[in-house]
Image (cartoon, rainbow, N blue to C red):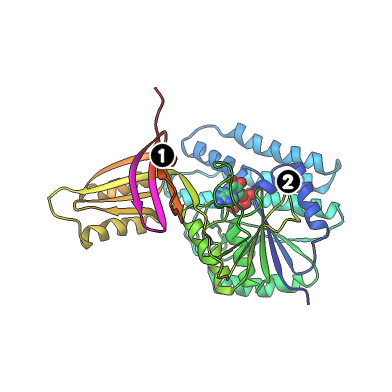
Amino acid sequence: MAKMVVYKFGGASVKDADAIKNLAEILRNRLRRNMVIVVSAMGKTTNALESILELKLSGNDYSLNSAKIKEFHFQICSELFPNGHRIFLLLENLFIALEKRLEFDLNKEIYDEYYDSVIGYGELLSSRIVMEYLCLEGMITLWKDAREFIKTNSDFRFAKINWSLTKAFCQSQLRPLLETYPIVTQGFIGSNEQNLPTTLGREGSDFSAAILATSLNAQSVTIWKDVPGVLNADPKRYSDTVLFQEIGYEEAAEMTYYGASVIHPKTIKPLAIAGIPLFVKSFLKPDSDGTKIHQTEHTVQVPTYIVKEKQLLVSFKVTDFTFIEEKQIHQVYEQLRALKLRVNMLQISAISISLVMDSQLFMLEKLLTNLKPFFEIRYNEGLELLTILHPGQISIAEHLEGYEVLLEQSTRNTIQVVRRKKVEN
Ligand SMILES: Nc1ncnc2c1ncn2[C@@H]1O[C@H](COP(=O)(O)OP(=O)(O)O)[C@@H](O)[C@H]1O
Ligand SMILES: N[C@@H](CC(=O)OP(=O)(O)O)C(=O)O
């Protein structure tokens, strides 16, 4: 029996008609039974859907924005399919369903649940287009709605996987079909026990691929990216990057934890536990090896640079001259837990706790309101968190030119700096 494999194609690999043609070429000699193909929304569609939700929430007209999304998908299809192909009707139906969803009232209280009922349309559209295009090219696959087998709790927007249900559904629903056909499905989306749509957190499609691989005991996962593999820095920010041919699960997990956006941070853990290798390969050079992430003794020696944008630095200062101890840390962390906020960096001094987090809609407001009675709070938004792993003897100064430093921490193996670009006068 052919071993199970999972391929994941992200937004960049399905961003336009040429990209989808390229995807089909990658699959032409690779497609086979026992293959699951996970697809993300096309290009920046998820951001575009988020903008609609923000406009709707603030009571503004979003009709131009939704028309643009529709036009974008129909334009791509007109370049891929002949007139009258059934994809046009399928898309029309999906857009009618989306418009109907958007007719419901939206307010802050129900934002997360509403968000999940809308945002997954990007993946539903792209996966349909990919499946139909593969079929047109003579590659028969089945289209499956991931919400039928990726089961989660009800933490809308950041849903946690119900592993036992997901595994059971993958084994009972997908495995028998996979013996005959490859399956195309969506990343990022799932559903809760009431079958309401949920999502796994932005950029969560890599994680979906790992969930499916684990649930189906796959042999490997390959995520197809617009980079040669995992590099020691984001090539969009740094020149002269180094490609890692192989890295260990731990190294990869650490990189993603600090914000290396090439892989979603939740992806590594399930694969490491199951011992399933993850290949990061270029969809532009599909025959190149890329990076293999697996159990290995190989250690990374070169400095690795990771920049996380849109960071928020919040400082909580006690006002009654007591020193920071467990009680205050607990108070702050209780709120973070309740608001589902993750800390990227923490610094404690005698009288204050400083936290660095991703900026998130509404969260700052809530955090401030809840902790105002206990602390004097100051914050700065729009910051960057630079992390350097294995810094060796490098000079940090060159990474700070043109920046103001707000917070700095270093150990032998890691340097972290919260910085803000200086404004030129
Ligand atoms: N260390 C790194 N190595 C390679 N790419 C990186 C790294 N850090 C950040 N990136 C960025 O990750 C991008 C690919 O991830 P992403 O855009 O999420 O892919 P997709 O959404 O298509 O799955 C690259 O274009 C690159 O800019
Ligand atoms: N489309 C979703 C999920 C995702 O993972 O996308 P990508 O694979 O393009 O990062 C998002 O943009 O958040």
- Tag 1 and tag 2, C-beta contact below 8 Å: no
Q: Amino acid at mark 2?
A: Leu
SS label for mark 2 = helix
Front-most of 407 and 178? 407
Residue plotted at (22% across, 57% down)? 328
Q: Quadrant of the C terminus?
A: top left
- Where residue 226 appears, x then y in whole percent? 66, 48
Q: Is residue 50 left or right of residue 146?
A: left
280 and 78: which one is in front? 280
Q: Amino acid at mark 1?
A: Leu
Tell me if 118 is positioned left or right of 34 in this view. Answer: left
* Magenta span main SS: strand
On the image, the x and y values in percent for residue 5 come to 71, 67
Q: Relative to residue 26, is residue 298 drawn left or right?
A: left
| Residue position for label 1 | 400
- Which residue is outermost to the left? 321
Who's the residue at 63% across and 45% down the image? 98
First in sequence: mark 1 vs mark 2:
2
Badge number at residue 189:
none
The residue stretch that appears in magenta:
405-417
234 vs 42, nearest the viewer: 234
Give the quadrant of residue 35.
bottom right
Q: Which numbered tag is attached to residue 91?
A: 2
Mark 1: give few (<14), some (14-19) or many (20+) Cα within 10 Å: some
Could you say which is closer to the camera, residue 312 or residue 399? 399
User: Tag 1's secondary structure?
Assistant: loop
Crowd class of label 2 (few under 14; some 14 to 19; many from 20; radius 10 Å): many
Q: Tell me if 187 is positioned left or right of 340 in this view.
A: right
In the rendered structure, does residue 416 fall within the stretch colored magenta? Answer: yes
